[in-house]
Image (cartoon, rainbow, N blue to C red):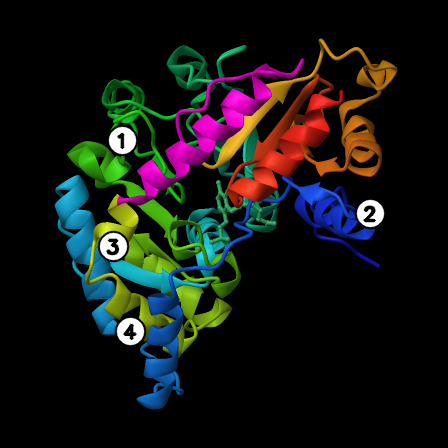
């Protein structure tokens, strides 16, 4: 049959989770917690249902939730988004990113991604009829390279997708990165799509450099986040998009014909739960402890740790392992690791358009300590 995405198969996250389940491996592949959210959050869903919130909410989302998001963003990033016309609740970040692309991209527009990048960006650009322009992050440390970015801009550049904290590398933009980005785009009308789903997972006391904190950048940005990451509910599929009113108006034109709106009881529950900032403010310390436990355990193996400043992902280089399987192509290495060692991981090749073969894999540490310890024991045998 005709295909809009001829190169695309099933996502690596689905493939590795299915294999992990099939062979009983510890699943450190797909990014999701193996523990429950705060019971108070689940109870808030029950309360919302008991209160009769079962029918369509407003297209842009439950007003109380949009107001709660506006308060959080104003407090943390110092920018006021109007809940009426600058905030839309989405079915997770994936929908928000695709909706932003469908709303903004005209055929032939160039959209820049910084590679390696999350797997939904490129198909989203292609579905929107855009041309993908891949700008590599710096070699080794996988940080933004603003000279390469500036060199990639053309008269057809429509938008740049910025992801911080960064999946898969765990690198985090700093305030001066935002300023360098500004230097690149200030004289253009290039838009920005900010993927900030890991905004509350930045470690070692660093702040999250949201595009919202920079007035010039914020004025041309659609910023996306996800409650799935922040509240340990990836299966709820609720997120949001922030943008100045003219951009948001375009976003909503597509949103209303894409999902129209997002499930009502979860939105009421999230609105109530957001009244207390402690859960999202405490998230960094919660995950930093897991990162430190996991890294300390990995330090006793032959795996070489890459830095992890944010996200719940730890990348490792397995080039120094003694096993002959280290010479397999990385995707096959991950299959072997899952089947024979009992730990599922994601090959970094999945985040590159050319599927490049490096001895790098991503491990997710959003897991109970017992799960991490079990994975570490298995990895220690390598
Ligand atoms: N962007 C990035 C960088 C992600 O890691 C994820 C989740 N894996 C998403 C977007 C999608 O988020 P959601 O589950 O809310 O659609
Ligand atoms: N964002 C998650 C990850 O990077 C996976 C989400 C998905 O499976 N689409 O692992």
Q: Secondary structure at mark 2?
A: helix
User: Quick one: label 2 or label 1, which is nearer the N terminus?
Assistant: 2
Which region shows up in magenta?
Answer: 282-310
Q: Secondary structure at mark 1?
A: loop
Q: Name the residue nearer the viewer: 190 or 56.
A: 56
**Within 10 angstroms of label 1, few (less than 14), some, or many (20 or more) residues?**
many
Q: Residue at x 71, y 38 (%)?
A: 344
Q: Name the residue nearer the viewer: 18 or 135.
A: 18
How many angstroms separate mark 2 from mark 1 (CA)? 40 Å
Mark number displayed over residue 209: 1
Return the residue at label 4: 62
The reply to whether residue 199 is visible in this rendering is: no
Return the residue at label 3: 246
Side of 380 where 111 appears, left or right = left
How many angstroms separate mark 3 from mark 4 (CA)? 21 Å
How many angstroms separate mark 3 from mark 1 (CA)? 24 Å
């Amino acid at each position: 049959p005709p295909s809009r995405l001829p190169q695309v198969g099933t996502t690596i996250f689905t493939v590795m989770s299915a294999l992990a389940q099939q062979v009983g491996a510890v699943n450190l592949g797909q990014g999701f917690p193996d523990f429950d959210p705060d019971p108070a959050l689940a109870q808030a869903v029950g309360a919302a249902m008991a209160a009769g919130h079962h029918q369509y909410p407003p297209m842009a989302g439950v007003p109380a939730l949009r107001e709660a998001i506006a308060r959080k963003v104003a407090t943390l990033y110092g920018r006021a988004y109007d809940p009426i016309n600058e905030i839309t609740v989405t079915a997770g970040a994936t929908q928000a990113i695709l909706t932003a692309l469908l709303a903004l991209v005209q055929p032939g527009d160039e959209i820049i991604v910084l590679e390696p990048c999350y797997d939904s960006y490129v198909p989203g650009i292609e579905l929107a009829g855009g041309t993908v322009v891949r700008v590599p992050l710096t070699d080794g440390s996988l940080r933004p390279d603003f000279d390469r970015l500036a060199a990639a801009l053309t008269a057809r550049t429509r938008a740049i997708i910025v992801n911080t904290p960064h999946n898969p590398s765990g690198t985090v933009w700093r305030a001066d990165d935002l300023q360098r980005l500004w230097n690149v785009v200030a004289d253009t009308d290039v838009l920005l799509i900010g993927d900030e789903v890991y905004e509350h997972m930045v470690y070692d006391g660093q702040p999250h450099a949201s595009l919202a904190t920079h007035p010039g950048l914020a004025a041309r940005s659609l910023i996306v986040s996800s409650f799935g990451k922040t509240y340990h509910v990836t299966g709820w599929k609720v997120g949001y998009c922030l943008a100045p009113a003219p951009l948001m108006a375009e976003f909503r034109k597509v949103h209303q014909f894409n999902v129209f709106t997002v499930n009502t009881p979860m939105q009421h529950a999230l609105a109530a739960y957001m009244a207390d900032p402690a859960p999202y403010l405490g998230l960094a310390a919660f995950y930093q402890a897991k990162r430190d436990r996991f890294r300390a355990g990995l330090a006793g193996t032959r795996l070489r740790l890459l830095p992890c400043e944010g996200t719940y992902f730890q990348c490792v280089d397995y080039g120094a392992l003694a096993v002959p399987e280290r010479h397999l192509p990385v995707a096959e290495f991950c299959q072997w690791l899952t089947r024979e060692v009992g730990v599922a991981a994601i090959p970094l090749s999945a985040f590159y358009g050319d599927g490049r073969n490096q001895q790098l894999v991503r491990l997710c540490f959003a897991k109970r300590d017992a799960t991490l310890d079990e994975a570490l024991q298995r990895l220690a045998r390598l």
